Image (cartoon, grey):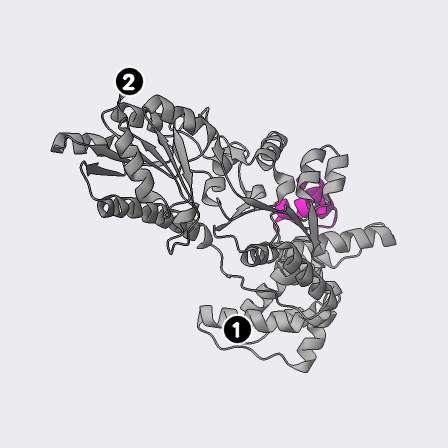
Amino acid sequence: MSERQSNPPDADNWQRRTILVVDDEAGMRSFLSRALEGKVGSVVTADSAEAGAALLEQRHFDLILLDVALPGASGMEWLKALRAAGNPADVILMTAFADMDTAIAALRSGAADFIVKPFRVDQMLNAIRRCFDRTRLTRENYLLRRELDKYTIHKHFIGESEAMKKVMALVARVAPMPSTVLVTGESGTGKEVVARELHRLSGRQGQFVPLNCGAMAPEIIESELFGHAKGAFTGAAGGRHGLFLYADGGTLFLDEISELPLPMQAKLLRVIEDRRIRPLGTEREIAVDVRIVAACNRNLANEVAAGRFRQDLFYRLDVVSVAIPPLRTRPEDIVPLAEHFSEQLSAQLGLPAVPLSPSLIRVLKGYDWPGNARELRNLVERALILGEYPVELLAHQADPAQANLPEEEREDAAMPADDGTLLESVERRHILQVLAAEGGNRVEAARRLGISRRTLDRKCLQWGLRP
């Protein structure tokens, strides 16, 4: 076995690709190594399926060039074994004995392409290009589908406050580093915007792949992150890649990291330390180059103290921490954000912008914004649809928590607390603000408040609010 390394410039970014050549003829291995040298990042050769399998246990390959006629296990037999084990690498089969039955059998076994010996260099390069292009398009299509539900494509930071300028400076300094970053801040402050900016400024060639850990069922999150082989669990009719492979060479953004179950926290810690993943239902490990950016709207140190988050994972994630201040502490950012959202949403909705009058600006700057930038964006969208900024914003400045409550609940919510104490009033006001920011969603509100849904329901019942 031998290996050749090179890192030439290439328009298709082939220098990041790894290829395994498995052929029992030394001349063919040498020919392919020379042909691919200077075009891909790494070419490794093996003289049998058994030797190739040993190499796959050690590292990940993007493509395998596999001879059909091999001593021991044939190329076709090994290909079937690879697919049964869930190995995702593309395989181009090579054979000197070409017929229609062999070609059909190769494709049915999971080969990406089929090439007949003897072949010219350009024939092999074209076959390789087709495989790499197909892999790239598969990744891009997958990520595009994940992004279609996002209404806004964040480009750059919007903000003129000193607090946000400090955040921008920190992001610019940290972005080129491979270190893990923990982004903290209240819901709606723009943690994903920061994560995307970290990726954009990092220079990494791979994709930005987001995952909301709180929105993923615990029983499927491991498969979502690491992938799985066919038959790995009930309903796994076929193998699939995980998000770590889709983010290879790029950034994986783990939002709401505090919601990750404890068993998955241990597995994530191992991946961060070893830079290797193991898909469900397989025994092999795959090397990955992924930068982790995590985000949380809770205090992770408190979660560690409460036993809900692993201390060792917290230290691994908190190499650099970027804290985003809430919108209520930086009123000078409200108008630039509102104008940005207005321009963005006007183009998307095909509606004219609604101007911000001086009196409205004073109201916006005096509002508490419990939902932060997300709440401001929703307000701008509502204004574009209605043709004016909604008057209820002005009507509920005394108690902004009521702005998003259903009409029939507002009168009840305005009643004073039962015992009339200041503490009870403050608690009630804060809970109603968070509930309003979440659009009345009590599950999300309870999660933000750090209390159980049952506790929130009990308090709302005390205040006469119906579910």
From the top left corner, tell me how far across and down residue 71 is, in percent: 27, 20
Mark 1: few, some, or many residues within 10 Å (few <14, many ≥20)?
A: some
Left or right of residue 37, residue 287 in this image:
right
Residue at 24% across / 45% down in the picture?
Answer: 121
Residue 72, numbered circle:
2
Q: Is residue 465 magenta?
A: yes
Quarter of the image that includes the N terminus: top left
Q: Amino acid at mark 2?
A: Gly
Q: Is residue 189 visible?
A: no
Q: Is residue 26 visible?
A: yes
From the top left corner, tell me how far across and down residue 259 is, in percent: 62, 39
Q: Amino acid at mark 1?
A: Glu
Dot 2: element: loop
Closer mark to the observer between disc 1 and disc 2: 2
Whole-angstrom CA distance, mark 1 to mark 2, is 65 Å
Q: Which residues are magenta?
A: 441-467
Residue at 18% across / 33% down in the picture?
Answer: 104
Left or right of residue 383, residue 431 in this image:
right
Residue at 60% across / 32% down in the picture?
Answer: 270
Taking depth in this image into account, of 1 and 80 the one nearest to the observer is: 1
The residue labelled by disc 1 is: 343
Residue at 76% across / 40% down in the picture?
Answer: 302
